[in-house]
Image (tube, rainbow, N blue to C red):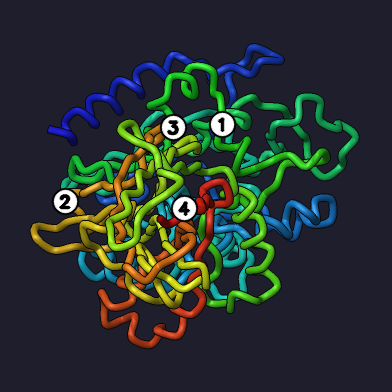
Amino acid sequence: MYINFFLFFIISCNDNIKKNNSVLDESSNEPWPFKIYEFDSDGNIINSEIDILDFQPSRDCQACHPNHVEEWKLSSHYRSTNSQMFKIAFENAKESHFDEGDRFCVQCHSPKLFVTGLYESELEEGSLASEIANENIGCDFCHTQTRLNFNSLIVNDYSLIDAEYYNNPGEGIKYGSTVDPDTNNSFHKSVYNSIYKDSRTCLPCHNMIIRDAPVHMTMAEWASDPFNDMADNRSCQSCHMSYNGEYHSHMFSGIDIDLTQPLDHEDNQKRIASITSLLDSAAISYFNNSEDSIKSYAHSNDTLQIPFSIQNKTAHNIPTGTSELREAWIELVVYNKNNEPICEFGTIESNKDFLKYNNHNIIFTSWLKNGQDTVYSSIEAYDIINNSLKINETFEWNYSCYIPEHIQDSIIVKSRMRIRPVKPQLFYSDPAFNEYFHLLDNIPIFDIEQSKIEKTIFIH
């Protein structure tokens, strides 16, 4: 029933946002140009007006835009086919679904290959075409986009391919969000296009429904708040491409880092700093709920009740995107006056430890299901159990902690929300991960600053 309602909502949302007009160039009232490609139900290109060499490599952009390129090379857009997690999922998809599995993955992770109909194996190593393709979601794919795609990526066993892009590469024109771009430019023509300020530029890939299961629905989560959808308030760009006074960040910070590098690697330190700043205000916690508030005193040899609530302050769920890979949870610890724990909830000793899924801990995540089996790749999913903290949701809970008789004076209750981009369980889900166990050490854990709260309680 939930899925049917969700699908009804998505279809309704798509119908509404299609009323927005991205077809005409505001300056000339002429239709925005784009090149056509057509594919069959297996994702094979029937016809394409786009050649891989219509796209330029990022090094052509670097001379004039060094900061943009440097930041983009730290992004998940740049690494979208390079992570070990993707490579294993990609090989599995090709093994189980053959060429269609290849096309299913590249339609979002390597869209230049998708719109040209090329396969990575067809590219000569070291060639310009290979360089362009291996930059994945690169400068020129985004900045030759001319129109919005208003639809989710909706796929099933009859066709795993559904991505539509409206690009105009190879014409010497770069489109962007600068209203009055510099026209004194011998490298390319610069044209303002309002879609670059619109959250729906993130479609179709950040809204995917497979076999009626809404598996990756960040855009739908955002649009479920009318305040966001009607006025494009809290746009994706405003958070994930923040403006520093000179230009918009191109790191596209979310929650992921490069797991092939240690946490203290210079590049990961830059990613971690950006993600930490992004997450600082993602959620706010309280020692109260709709029924009660925490007391300032308690008795030894008695059970302390700890009312708790946490509110999602982001413009989507926590976690979002590939939420089946991610975990957010509440760590709450009660300490005695010597800073020794009396009660612990949601604590782990290291970043590669499993969380304890039980009735005492608050954990936000999701699970993709194939029958009774939990899977970690969307192409294998037939259902989803989504236990994320929903957009605008305030989740309430009651913790209980027994205070031993010997506890005197006071205790301190401390809590925080923590989140990590990868569940350690993933590395035990497939034998192909066996050689990558060392990457577990590189999983970061982020603490959301505004979720950190503490309370001193006096013991009678």
Q: Nearer the viewer, residue 450 or 306?
A: 306
> Mark 4 or mark 3, which has the lower sequence index?
3
The residue nearer to you, when weighing 441 against 44, is 441
Classify 10 Å Cα crowding around label 3: few (below 14), some (14-19), many (20 and above). many
Which tag is nearer the camera, tag 2 or tag 1? 1
Q: Amino acid at mark 1?
A: Ser
Which label number is shown at residue 382?
2
Crowding at dot 1, Cα within 10 Å, few <14 / some 14-19 / many 20+, comes out as some
* Most distant residue in the front direction: 460
Quadrant containing the C terminus in the rendered view: bottom left
In the picture of the structure, the residue carrying the numbered disc 3 is: 222
Give left or right: position of 99 versus 335. left
| Residue furthest to the right | 184
Q: CA distance from mark 3 to mark 2?
A: 23 Å
Residue 357 location, x and y as percent? 24, 63
> Which residue matches tag 1?
235
Which-is-in-front pick, marks 3 and 2?
A: 3
Instruction: Mark 2 or mark 1: name the one nearer the start of the chain.
Output: 1
CA separation, marks 2 and 1?
A: 30 Å
